[in-house]
Amino acid sequence: MSKITALDTYDVRFPTSRELDGSDAMNPDPDYSAAYVVMRTDQPSLAGYGLAFTIGRGNDVQKAAIDALNHHVAGLDLDEVIDDLGGFARRLIGDSQLRWLGPEKGVMHMAIGAVVNAAWDLAARAAGKPLWRFIADMTPEQIVATIDFRYLTDALTPEEALTMLHAAAAGKARRLAQLLQEGYPAYTTSPGWLGYSDEKMQRLAREAVAAGFRTIKLKVGMNVEDDVRRCRLARATVGPDIGIAVDANQRWDVPDAIAWLRHLAEFRLAWVEEPTSPDDVLGHAAIRHAVAPVPISTGEHTQNRVMFKQLFQANAVDLIQIDAARVGGVNENLAIMLLAAKFGVRVFPHAGGVGLCELVQHLAMADFVAISGNKDDRAIEFVDHLHEHFVDPVVIANGCYIAPSAPGFSAQMRTDSVAQYVYPEGPAWCMPVDTAKA
Amino acid sequence: MSKITALDTYDVRFPTSRELDGSDAMNPDPDYSAAYVVMRTDQPSLAGYGLAFTIGRGNDVQKAAIDALNHHVAGLDLDEVIDDLGGFARRLIGDSQLRWLGPEKGVMHMAIGAVVNAAWDLAARAAGKPLWRFIADMTPEQIVATIDFRYLTDALTPEEALTMLHAAAAGKARRLAQLLQEGYPAYTTSPGWLGYSDEKMQRLAREAVAAGFRTIKLKVGMNVEDDVRRCRLARATVGPDIGIAVDANQRWDVPDAIAWLRHLAEFRLAWVEEPTSPDDVLGHAAIRHAVAPVPISTGEHTQNRVMFKQLFQANAVDLIQIDAARVGGVNENLAIMLLAAKFGVRVFPHAGGVGLCELVQHLAMADFVAISGNKDDRAIEFVDHLHEHFVDPVVIANGCYIAPSAPGFSAQMRTDSVAQYVYPEGPAWCMPVDTAKA
């Protein structure tokens, strides 16, 4: 009987702040980082990989939180984990002492998400399937058994979820073939970072359209005149048929958001992302009502399924971002995608960062095949950074994510990348001596 | 010019699980713990003390999060901190890289709260005043300058807060004298832990009433028949004039809470605390509406001012608990108490744990003198555990907290207690060798 032997963790940081890649109104100088976890087994060729994404400082705290889960994992039978991924996640979330640190939010919940995702990666590898396919091949009963419905039953019961999944099962084979042929739509944020000049933004926007993307996203929220100018330039650059979304990264209070967005309404935005605090369900509802029909969204910082449930109950959003590494792993994202499907809300997964594109494509593709049945009215974010550090990087063709075929969740980092960027001892972080001071 | 030299941190844990003190429906075996922080200065006799309360495992993660803030603090001028406690807190909360780990929730936010509270302790000590008095002696303008109104202005603007504080200033001197004479009402949870027998609960309830407490609180949520029996026994024990509150510690989904509470309505409960997820604003509103007039409350796990704002906006609660060590420090609790005063919601601070009684009494007393002007329609929780480890422990007389007179925030732990209970190397954690195995 195979055993899980340990969680090995690594503090991996990329010095992205040197180029202002990833700069926005709230995050002027991120160093994209991963608290990276390898779930080892007693089979040298079989391990599970997961990560929590951070933007630099605090990645060590995130790593310590993953280490705090080691005692729940080391020594478990491999089959016990992969045959009951719901029970595995519930044991981590249910640790009553660790639960005090959240509950189900922030550092500790992201740590649980990284470990739970590593277990799904391991299960998919053991089955020889990419994760999206592993999920798509599960029965409705198996999917429902992985989900923690605690605090959801006023909006979605296990019985309702089963009914939805059974209804979706009819078209699975057709959609699976369609996904393999067409891929899954992507949109790109690469042109839109706040630290870029107008010229760089326009050049990258042109390149994005030429590469087949149908939507681009710009960061906003520092200065309204700049935002109006950038939106106008972007619209002139991409023409009338390409979607332009904007992302304020939580910059505004509710009254500020309403006033600011009136200046941007003329650009027929595809959506406005994170106008205010991710915790402010009622604030999003108030903004959406005031600026209608401008579509409002949030989600990359939405801490758990309870907050998503309320965003839907309050009619606070037109669409959501999900994040593969913010909530408690695949299980909780399945719950969120089921809730979104029930409430008729479209999902535009958050990606970029470190490995987020690699991870979230699997969730969106599983949603298309097994849950919502839709993909052409939505898109996965794409940012062309840092993919070279992954063993099975995403493949984009004509503005679409191509369905991964390698077994697992695509979260495995290259060994040489981990060695190069491990913080603070990796060579990437040993800066040259300032000769002026010598 | 004096400097702050360092944050020293300690992982202090008390083995409370051995006696089931603190047991409830979600936390069967807590080891009450503190990630304890000492803000050192270059004056040997002057330091600030703060803590994040946890219940055991994960206290090391909490300590690591406080350590991650050291670079914001070490080397600062003392006067720069104590003259601008608002700016100090905003710099910690505004660290864009660390902010990703929340934002403003969970482990990282509790760490910020511990450090911010240590700065307030330091400021009050430097002024030679207990913290409640230090706050009460601030001008309305000074209080408002400490508060981060971001994400609040749709419910409370700085101008409104100023108006409220100026209106309250009139009666300050009278209320200060009243507080010194009468103390501040307390209620006690000591009888109500779920692990206690009926006999122990009844004995402790009798003792509580004899000691002058006007309200007791029982833990509920494991088994409805047990809860009905315990409420009936408690009511028979304390008579009709003593308040009985119950606390479900987040045990129920929304429909469960509604069904369960119909069984308890006959006991005229003072309030029902944490019926469901602390994140579920709309769920609390639905429960409150369904079981009215049973009073509903939450707050000890409410992560920040944005969630409290929504609880008030949604009419989701009749009263709230505030916690001195869950949110981002004194500044954020001032914001929450101002919001509560504006919305007319009574505050029953959460205490118990490690040092929470010591801390929160200062906030409630400052609220009475300088903000809400009320104390006799509310009460601070009291649990008679672990006070012996503090240099300036709370004093209770005739069911009231006596106003502290020593300078500071009462969070300083005894040096010998820290040495005894530091984890894992302290003598309290070096268990006797099991001789049966020898």
Image (spheres, coloured by chain):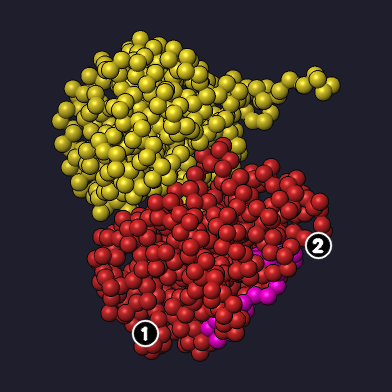
Chain colours: A red, B yellow
Q: With respect to residue B234, does A268 lie above or below?
A: below
Report if residue B10 is visible in the image.
no
Report the chain holding disc 2.
A
Residue at image position (62%, 77%) is A403
Q: Which three-letter amino acid code belongs to the residue tagged 1?
A: Arg
**Prevailing SS of the magenta stretch:** loop
Q: Is residue B353 magenta?
A: no
**Which residue range is magenta in the image?**
A395-419
Image quadrant where one finds the N terminus of chain B: top left
Q: Which mark is residue B137?
A: none
Using the numbered discs, state the Cα–Cα distance from disc 1 to disc 2 in whole angstroms: 50 Å
Quarter of the image for residue A133 reads bottom right
Q: Which three-letter amino acid code belongs to the residue tagged 2?
A: Ser
The 10 Å Cα crowd at callout 1, few under 14, some 14 to 19, many 20 or more, is: many
On the same chain, marks 1 and 2? The answer is: yes
Q: Nearer the viewer, mark 1 or mark 2?
A: 2
Left or right: where A201 falls relative to A95: left
Q: Dot 2 corresponds to which residue? A: A45
Q: With respect to residue B307, does A409 lie above or below?
A: below
The 10 Å Cα crowd at callout 2, few under 14, some 14 to 19, many 20 or more, is: few
Q: Secondary structure at mark 2?
A: loop
> Percent x, y for residue A359?
60, 66
Callout 1–callout 2 Cβ contact below 8 Å: no
Q: Secondary structure at mark 1?
A: helix
Image quadrant where one finds the C terminus of chain B: top right
> Percent x, y for residue B278?
41, 43
Report if residue A93 is visible in the image.
yes
Report the chain holding disc 1.
A
Q: Dot 1 corresponds to which residue? A: A235
